[in-house]
């Protein structure tokens, strides 16, 4: 069985010392591809370099809502000049985070809309970050007609009703390792209710390690535990989860 980790942050310091081993472990254990995600200009540069160095890794570039205040014309030019790089498959992660508010809400909304506009112009899917901003995220995606390009709501934290609204707009729902936590009742319910044809799986490495590695550094290898939990929740074969989520990810990001 093969799997794809649709969202990891291999550029972060937690992987600096052993990134080669991390990627090799994943590849040898059936993790066919990894999408490593940039969240700022320097992180995007590192993500692109990693993707160029490792055949199984692809990159997405964008400005995370935490860094939204840094998005200016120069940053937008950087994104526009690099989105057509061979192994860049999406714009993001972008979106809204009203939990930590490291950037003001105004800056987050401005950066979100600007990146959606860019994604539409270059016809690339988007990777959406949404934390404590469900209504605002849905409204902006609808107003900006983001369904024209589609994408994924990463590390989905809304309820099933929101999930179906996102799906109706043309988005996939990405399930992380927190679905293995006993107290993740809403996320478990989302995984149960939405069709497997609309699900991606992710680690969000180095964060959100699944059981039995909760509290330790997460890595792409552990995306298998997310797939196993979804199979249990939906009462389907693990092979079906693997095959369908791989197909979903390849379709969304046009992976070859």
Image (spheres, helix red, strand yellow):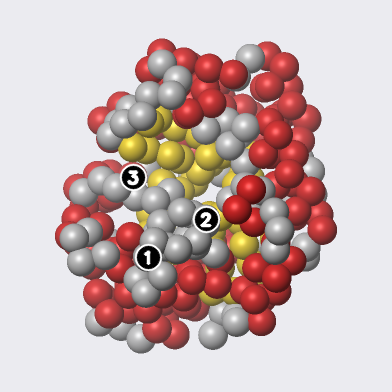
Q: Which residue is mark 3?
A: 166
Other-residue count near label 2 (Cα within 10 Å), few / some / many at <14 / 14–19 / ≥20? some
**Residue 82 visible to an observer of this rendering:** yes
**Residue 171 visible to an observer of this rendering:** no
Quadrant in which residue 27 is drawn: bottom right
- Which residue does the image show at 60% across and 19% down from the upper left? 71
- Furthest residue toward right: 53
> Closer to the camera, 181 or 15?
15
> What's the CA distance linking mark 1 and mark 3?
29 Å
- Which residue does the image show at 44% across and 32% down from the upper left? 95
Answer above or below: position of 105 versus 44: above
Image location (x, y in percent) of residue 88: 71, 47
Q: Which residue is mark 2?
A: 206
Image location (x, y in percent) of residue 6: 53, 59
Answer above or below: position of 28 versus 5: below
Query: Are discs 1 and 2 less than 8 Å apart at CB?
Result: no
Image location (x, y in percent) of residue 123: 63, 38
> What's the CA distance linking mark 1 and mark 2?
11 Å
> What's the CA distance linking mark 3 and mark 2?
26 Å
Would you say 25 lies left or right of 203 here? right
Quadrant in which residue 106 is drawn: top left
Image location (x, y in percent) of residue 121: 64, 29
- Which residue does the image show at 30% across and 83% down from the upper left? 236
> Closer to the camera, 81 or 46?
46
Q: Secondary structure at mark 2?
A: loop
Q: Which residue is mark 1?
A: 214
């Amino acid at each position: 069985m093969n799997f794809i980790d649709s969202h990891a942050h291999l550029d972060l310091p937690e992987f600096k010392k052993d990134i080669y081993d991390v990627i090799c472990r994943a590849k040898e254990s059936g993790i066919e591809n990894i999408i490593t995600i940039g969240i700022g200009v320097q992180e995007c540069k590192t993500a692109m370099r990693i993707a160029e160095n490792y055949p199984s890794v692809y990159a997405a570039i964008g400005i995370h809502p935490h860094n939204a205040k840094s998005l200016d014309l120069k940053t937008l030019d950087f994104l526009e000049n690099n989105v057509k790089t061979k192994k860049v498959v999406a714009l993001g992660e972008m979106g809204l985070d009203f939990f930590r508010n490291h950037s003001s809400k105004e800056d987050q909304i401005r950066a979100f809309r600007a990146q959606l506009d860019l994604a539409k112009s270059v016809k690339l899917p988007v990777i959406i970050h949404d934390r404590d901003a469900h209504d605002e995220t849905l409204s902006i995606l609808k107003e900006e007609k983001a369904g024209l390009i589609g994408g994924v709501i990463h590390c989905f934290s809304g309820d099933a009703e929101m999930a179906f609204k996102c799906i109706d707009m043309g988005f996939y729902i990405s399930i992380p390792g927190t679905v293995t936590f006993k107290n993740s009742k809403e996320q478990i319910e989302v995984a149960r209710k939405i069709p497997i044809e609309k699900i991606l799986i992710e680690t969000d490495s180095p964060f959100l390690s699944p059981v039995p590695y909760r509290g330790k550094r997460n890595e792409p290898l552990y995306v298998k535990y997310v797939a196993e939990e979804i199979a249990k929740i939906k009462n389907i074969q693990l092979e079906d989860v693997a095959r369908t989520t791989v197909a979903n990810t390849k379709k969304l990001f046009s992976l070859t």
